Image: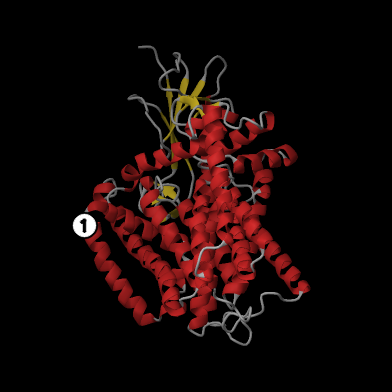
Amino acid sequence: MTTKTSNLPAGGTPLKGKLSENVFAMLILTAVTLACLCPFLGKAFHIDDPLFIWCGKHIVSEPGNFYNFKVNWEGREEAMAAATQNPPLASYYLAGAGAIVGWSELALHLAFFLPALAVLLGTLRLARRLCADPIFATAAVLFTPVFLICSGTVMCDVLMLALWVWAVVFWVEGIESNCRRKLAAAAIFAALSALAKYFGICLVPLLGFYGLMARRSFGRWAVYLLAPLVTLAFYEWATHALYQHALVSQAAAYATKLHGSTTGAKSVAILTALTFTGGCCAFVLFLAPWLWGRQIVLLAGIAVALCAGVFLMGDIWNRYSWLRGTSRLSTEAQIILWSVGGISVLALAIFDVWERRDADAWLLAAWVLGTFVFTAFINWTINGRSILPMAPAVGILAARRLEARGKISKTENRLVWGGPTIACIVAAIFAFLVAQSDFVLATAARQSAVQTSQRYTRPGRDLWFQGHWGFQYYMGELGGISEDRKQSKIRPGDFLVVPLDNCNLSPPDAPGDDLHFAGPRFLTTMNINIGAGFYTAQGGPLPFAFGHVPSEDVIVYQWRPN
């Protein structure tokens, strides 16, 4: 067993400081987090938010049978248990919040402020043990594009990560101090994390690996890892009893079935995952000259450009064949840029193990590399949400690397003023720009639904629509009817609304009214025309894209008799 004689990292501060200092730091972090997320509290419900909200509303009336209702999510009515690929803990959280504060955007986003804050508080506590500047490590997570974007949703990702981080915190502390209560707390948080999102079960091998590296042998501590496994096994049994098919197995089969069709060849999956990693953790690229030195960055850039050039001439453009001309050239440049950042993120993990070779380094490396492998080769699609879990580990690794290179003051335990600090400020501004573009995109979908509904709602005429995500939610709230392409009977005179920047579309071959709504102008997280696919790489190989972003267009057809 490896014992620690001090709670001091190299050049670091004590893990247990004065209580007043800890409380003050938490209060400051809470205030800063609220200030950063406040501009996004009114964000329209977006992407998969409706699935979680509908489930939360159902749970209020039937808490013991969470998926016992039907939805039309993919152009046909089906059981919620078949439509969703996530466990229900986030929806239970929404049910409690909605029952107390209501179901408005502001109310639910305020409720999800708490999991976002929990992620940062957990990162701060873990970083105090693992690096000299925990404030920088925590700020790096807050000012990461993927964290700001996901914190503006009511999906399961941030809640899962909050439980994940605290599971790691208690496990690391429990292994070091041989404290059974902390090990038990870690096991509970790990089980809850898996019930928030299935990826949470990956904590079992991660925590087990750390325990083995720290203790050098299996012991009683390993028994605690059975708790999440037993919990998920019980959930599998319970859902089979409720819905006649087990939902964990269903999600695994769904990912296996769709992975190849949504990610393409392995070369495409690797390059796209690198691009998403670099873009979602963009602060690493901004800090690259101080993390690695200018010469290494230049050489790495040249090497990646050559490798990316090989990829770009082949499989990736077979995968994204609709990108042509200036859009393709712009996408190529952005792929190369963010893939350099992605390689830098992975290199942080690898170099940290090479230089330190202790259990903490192995924990952070397994955390980052495991998330990358899951994103590239296991998840049903490559997206920003699957990159999110690595953000706390990347922030801590960046702080450790800067410390090793003398960019963190050993006397004051904070980032030295100068280039690194300015780069962090620029990275934070950039993260806000990306999150703001996603906010504008969500707002445009809501506005298109509201204005289209106002314009085409007529007495005696039904207003049908295709597509889903936030557009579907607001159209449904305004009285629109989601078309079931197998069962719906649209009458002559009825209207059919088709949002073009959406999915599951089957527009009729007929003329219609074109409506245009202003969305993001030069930067967006989702638009197939310029290769942006933050929520799924089916839309493009970039987590977000710069360029001319087309307006959000809707076509309205009036059904006419044959």
Give left or right: position of 445 versus 17: left
Which sits in the foreground, 253 or 273? Answer: 253
User: Could you tell me which residue is drawn at 48 percent across and 77 percent down?
Assistant: 401
The correct choice, above or below, for 341 with respect to 259 in the image is below
The correct choice, above or below, for 490 with respect to 70 in the image is above
At label 1, the amino acid type is Met
Which quadrant: the N terminus?
bottom right
The correct choice, above or below, for 230 with respect to 147 in the image is above
Which quadrant: the C terminus?
top left
Give left or right: position of 326 versus 458: left
User: Could you tell me which residue is drawn at 58 percent across and 53 percent down?
Assistant: 190
Relative image position of residue 113 (x, y in whole percent): 66, 53
Which sits in the foreground, 139 or 203? Answer: 203
User: Looking at the rendering, which quadrant does residue 182 occupy?
Assistant: bottom right
Colouring used for the render: secondary structure
- Residue sitting at the far bottom: 411
Circle 1 crowding by C-alpha within 10 Å: few under 14, some 14–19, many from 20: few
Q: Which residue is mark 1?
A: 313
Residue 87 appears anywhere in the view = no
Relative image position of residue 326 (x, y in whole percent): 29, 55
Relative image position of residue 218 (x, y in whole percent): 52, 63
User: Could you tell me which residue is drawn at 41 percent across and 47 percent down?
Assistant: 536
Which sits in the foreground, 114 or 283? Answer: 114
Relative image position of residue 251 (x, y in whole percent): 45, 39
